[in-house]
Amino acid sequence: MDASPHILIVDDHRDIRDLLGKFLVGHGLRVTPAANGTEMWEVLANHRIDLIVLDLMLPGEDGLVLCRRLRGEGRTTPVIMLTAMGEETDRIVGLEMGADDYVAKPFSSRELLARIKAVLRRTQSNGPTSAASPAGEERAVARFAGWTLDLARHDLHRPDGVVLPLSKGEFTLLVAFVERPKRVLSRDQLLDLARGRSAVPFDRSIDTQVSRLRRKLEDDPATPTLIKTVWGDGYMFTADVDFDDH
């Protein structure tokens, strides 16, 4: 029996479905495509799906309506919403409808793969161990600026090899950063990513967690180079990040 995660891609553009499907299959995932909501429900009725990649702009029922229906039926299948670049309102509404993450178009296949792995890791860690856990995911690491973050053991290794302990909050926040390098992330976005649907609007604890991370990562926390403040917008993780499943 194939235990690799089964991903449902719902997008009305065939070239996007084909391109993403081939890429994800090449990285050990199973993929089923759907062009619209009707096809999505047919797939869900006949297959166990571990995660749905759901385009916002679909003919007929759009991604927001479909996501709301999924949650209204009690389905907890993780959803990553594909939204247009800069559509902040769509992102917020999508998360309110029950999406677990979002990716703004245009995006790279590698970025989407990282998000899929992150959401699967996060959602599966909140429940019983699943046979559908990605192969090798227990050894996945992220490398940046000489540092190594072990995503399974929650260990952060300095460039000199010394292991620094991370609190749960620090680890979750750092994962949000390394999975979205060189992108400005607002405080609300970071709260969504770090705490999911339990996040409280206008919570300022993100600033405290960022300060703690800087004290561990930065040579001079007062003039940070890895986690920079973008005044009026949020924070940006500036390093290049490589993911290694081995």
Image: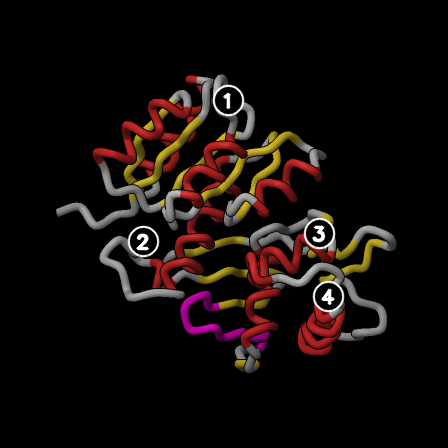
Q: Name the residue under label 2.
A: 134
Q: Name the residue under label 3.
A: 185
Q: Which of marks 2 and 4 is nearer the N terminus?
A: 2
Q: In this view of the protein, can residue 246 be seen by the observer?
A: no
Q: How is the protein colored in the picture?
A: secondary structure
Tell which tag, 3 or 1, sits nearer the viewer: 1
Q: Do the residues labelled 3 and 2 touch (CB within 8 Å)?
A: no
Q: Main secondary structure of the magenta part?
A: loop
Which class describes the residues within 10 Å of circle 2: few (<14), some (14-19), or many (20+)?
many
Q: What amino acid is found at the position of numbered circle 4 in the picture?
A: Asp
Q: Earlier in the sequence, mark 1 or mark 2?
A: 1
Q: Residue 203's mark?
A: 4
Residue at horizontal 75 percent and vertical 57 percent from the top:
235
Q: In which quarter of the image is residue 8?
A: top left
Identify the element where label 1 is drawn. loop
Whether residue 217 appears in magenta in the rendering, the answer is no
How far apart, in angstroms, are the residues tagged by discs 2 and 4?
33 Å
Q: Give the range drawn in magenta.
A: 150-160
Please give left or right for residue 205 compared with residue 244 in the image: right
Tell which tag, 2 or 4, sits nearer the viewer: 4
Q: What amino acid is found at the position of numbered circle 2 in the picture?
A: Pro
Identify the element where label 4 is drawn. loop
Q: What amino acid is found at the position of numbered circle 3 in the picture?
A: Leu
